[in-house]
Image: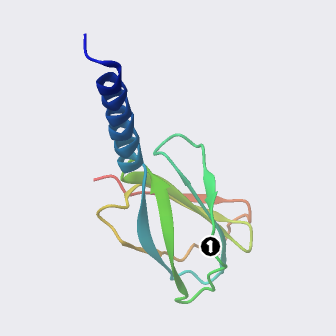
Amino acid sequence: MPPLPTACLAIALLAAAATAHAQDASRTHYVMLVNRAHDSVTKLSVAEPGSGAFRDVAVDPLRGGGDSATVGVHGAGCRYDLRFAFDDGRTLVYQDLDVCHYGLVRIRALPRKGVDAATQFTVSMAR
């Protein structure tokens, strides 16, 4: 049986290694958003793909017509659903977007004719 100081050192090293691994598993990916829509984006939310469990990401309103901002998406993986809320109440969801591969997201313009303000548009980004 190893002496007590050696055992304590081994336990401390294992705990440090586990903490370092856990920190690597959760990281921030930075994505540049460009609002090509006509309306302002007022809110951004992200979720694990297909989960529907969206969490808000801090972003200042993005005016329509080309306003841009860089945001951090924090999590363990690379694929996320991104939901954009517009000032007129409509939403746009990009499903299964690979933020490790795509560092730039162009928010597309939404149709205007015959569309209810509560309409959600969905775009699949899966390959």
Say above or below: 80 vs 109: above
Residue at the spot 56% in from the left edge and 80% down from the top edge? 37
Q: Label 1 crowding class (10 Å Cα cut-off): few <14, some 14-19, many 20+?
A: some
- Judge from the rendering whether residue 101 lies leftward or rightward of residue 87; answer left or right: left
Residue at the spot 32% in from the left edge and 61% down from the top edge? 100
Q: Which residue is farthest top?
A: 1
Q: Position of residue 111 (x, y in %)?
A: 58, 73
| Nearer to the camera, 104 or 19 | 19
Q: Position of residue 61 (x, y in %)?
A: 67, 79
Q: Which residue is farthest left?
A: 1
| Nearer to the camera, 88 or 58 | 58
Tag 1: amino acid: Val
Q: Please give the residue where the numbered disc 1 appears in the rendered image.
A: 59
Q: How is the image coloured?
A: rainbow
Residue at the spot 51% in from the left edge and 71% down from the top edge? 71
Is the N terminus in the top left, top right, bottom left or bottom right quadrant? top left
Q: Secondary structure at mark 1?
A: loop
Say above or below: 75 vs 105: above
